[in-house]
Amino acid sequence: MIEKAMISTVHYISQGADGEMHLGNIKRMLGAGANWIQLRLKDVPKAEVLATAIAAKKLCKNAGATLIVNDFPEVAKKADADGVHLGKSDMSPAEARKILGKNKIIGGTANTIEDCERLLEQQVDYMGVGPFRFTTTKKNLSPILGIEGYQQLMAQVLANPKAVPVIAIGGLLLDDMLGLKECGVHGVAISGMLTNSEKPEEEISRIMELFGSL
């Protein structure tokens, strides 16, 4: 199991119309202080995902940042990424572990306590739990949790002896951060707020300071 301290409190979920735009945004966020990048490249050929992942790995390595590939364990392995993030309809964490080995990071998406318990049984290293509110970033959005949903879910997750860091996701804004921290989440995953920011370094710095991790 990956140590909790290795899981960043700010995960940037990459955006862009193609691989080149994703890389441009990733480079910009690394320059702004991001230390954890999730490459989330959808609806393109897997060869483009791999080529983008290889280029993203070089950028992240030079910046001392962690690279996680969304959806594709095989791509993560070929690109020597630091791990993979699996959606609810993707390969199981147990199968991904067979591909990637014990030293890579495996995260999974959850929306309910049942999802969380399933992921914990399969020994993921962290869970992306959401959505907090409506977001256009993701298709087929799961039911919105809101702050009350996180309060209820986190109380149960934290009581589980197999608990791992929870990363909140889904339309997050700066004003949401304190309430989420008080619920017990480890950190947040952000896409649009940072991509569209004129000064992402300010948001990244404020969030890291709030959650107590640089």
Image (cartoon, rainbow, N blue to C red):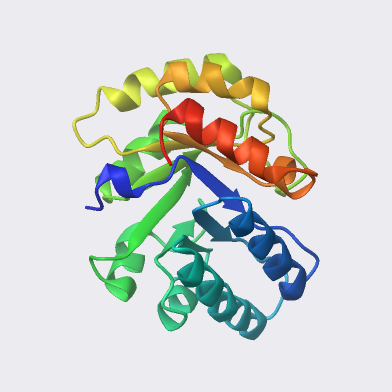
Left or right of 45? Residue 79 is left
- In what quadrant of the picture does the C terminus appear? top left
Q: Position of residue 136 (x, y in %)?
A: 78, 43
Q: Position of residue 152 (x, y in %)?
A: 44, 16
Left or right of 8? Residue 202 is right
Is 4 or 156 nearer to us in this picture? 4
Q: Is residue 181 above or below residue 129?
A: above
Q: Position of residue 138 (x, y in %)?
A: 70, 48
Q: Is residue 166 above or below residue 93?
A: above
Q: Residue at x 50, y 50 (%)?
A: 88
Is 85 or 68 nearer to us in this picture? 68
Q: Residue at x 53, y 47 (%)?
A: 11
Query: Total label count?
Result: 0
Q: Position of residue 40 (x, y in %)?
A: 62, 61
Q: Residue at x 55, y 51 (%)?
A: 34
Q: Residue at x 35, y 59 (%)?
A: 105
Q: Is residue 1 above or below residue 103?
A: above
Is residue 111 visible to us here?
no
Is 6 or 161 nearer to us in this picture? 6
